[in-house]
Amino acid sequence: MPRRVTAELDLDLGTSVDLIFQITAAQGVPLASESLTFSQGDRLYTPTEIVDQSGSRLHRLTAEQGPLAVRYDAVVHGPAQTPRTSDLETITYLRPSRYCQSDEVFAQARRQFRGLTGAELLAAVSTFVATTVTYTPGLSLGTDSAVTTLMTGQGVCRDYAHVVIALLRAMDMPARYAACFAPGLEPMDFHAVAEAYLDGAWYVVDATRLADRRSLVRIATGRDAADCAFLSYHGGYVGLERLHVDAVREDEIPDATAPDDHEALVQIA
């Protein structure tokens, strides 16, 4: 299933800044080709690549004051490798985190989903979040959490993912956050989904219903959005002048004659 993914960022740096990007396909994603460049005029920067325990690839560099152009282009071909999940990871993804306060939604989750386990629980949580949260670009804040989203009833993909994760953890099911490229997503951007650990595998829950889970390309994995930011920086001012993301599936999904019903168990491939 060939997929072409691109990301373009134009930044304005107020001074020399330590920059950390997570915008590339994760380790284990099979790449037919890949290009990542950081440029200021004729100057090219070579970043340091750091791979975390989940296979997320971080690219770090110190760039000087002025405009910085970041360009990423890759062609993904074939299924991704699925690393084994350790006992430590499953414990980590049961704990509350900054944006997924499972302890604060514990009582609500236990009332709402009493008696449900396994695939039934996944389906119930996905449907609940899909029907109670309204997708509202531009109205949520980067500091909003699962609790905030449950109160306001609005958000974007990161907010949907946080609510799903918090509710699943409150029901004793390990859940984590995944940043992805999503072919067919509208409006197109970096996408965020939740993953739940069931019977030894991670399955995607996308309560936004905006993307076909079968064509997602993993970028980063973590406890919540704090672990998967596409850009973080330290030591100076950074202005994001332009961001353009695209993801295109270059053929049909094998053995898939119907749209994703968001009910079947699907893994990020």
Image (cartoon, rainbow, N blue to C red):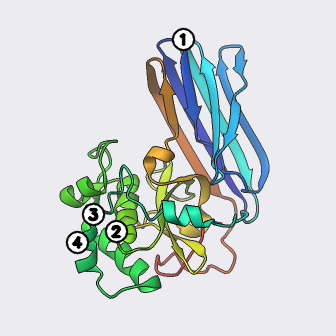
Percent position of residue 123, x then y: 41, 80
Q: Which residue is mark 4?
A: 108
Q: Which mark is residue 133?
A: 3
Residue 46 placement, left or right of 264: right
Mark number, residue 167: 2
Give how far apart the Cα atoms at labels 3 and 1 are: 41 Å
Question: What is the three-letter code of the residue carrying label 4?
Answer: Gln
How many numbered marks are there?
A: 4
Mark 4 secondary-structure assignment: helix
Q: Residue furthest right?
A: 32
**Along the viewing direction, whichever of 96 and 83 lies nearer the viewer:** 96
Label 1 sits on a secondary structure element that is: loop
- 228 over 177 or under it: above or below: above
Task: Please determine whether, in this image, residue 5 is positioned above or below residue 91.
Answer: above
Q: CA distance from mark 4 to mark 3?
A: 16 Å
- Location of residue 59 with respect to 46 vertically, above or below: below
> What's the CA distance linking mark 4 and mark 2?
8 Å
Is residue 211 visible in the rendered image? The answer is: no
Q: Position of residue 216 (x, y in %)?
A: 59, 61
Residue at 61%, 56% (x, y): give it: 218
Q: CA distance from mark 4 to mark 1?
A: 49 Å
Residue located 65% across and 34% down the image: 59
> Mark 4 or 3, which is nearer the eye?
4
According to the picture, the residue beneath numbered tag 1 turns out to be 65
Asked whether 232 or 153 is in front, the reply is 232
Q: Amino acid at mark 2?
A: Leu
Mark 4 near mark 2, Cβ–Cβ under 8 Å?
A: yes
- Mark nearer the N terminus (4 vs 2): 4
Task: Choose between 16 and 157: the one closer to the eye.
Answer: 16
Q: Is residue 214 above or below residue 37?
A: below
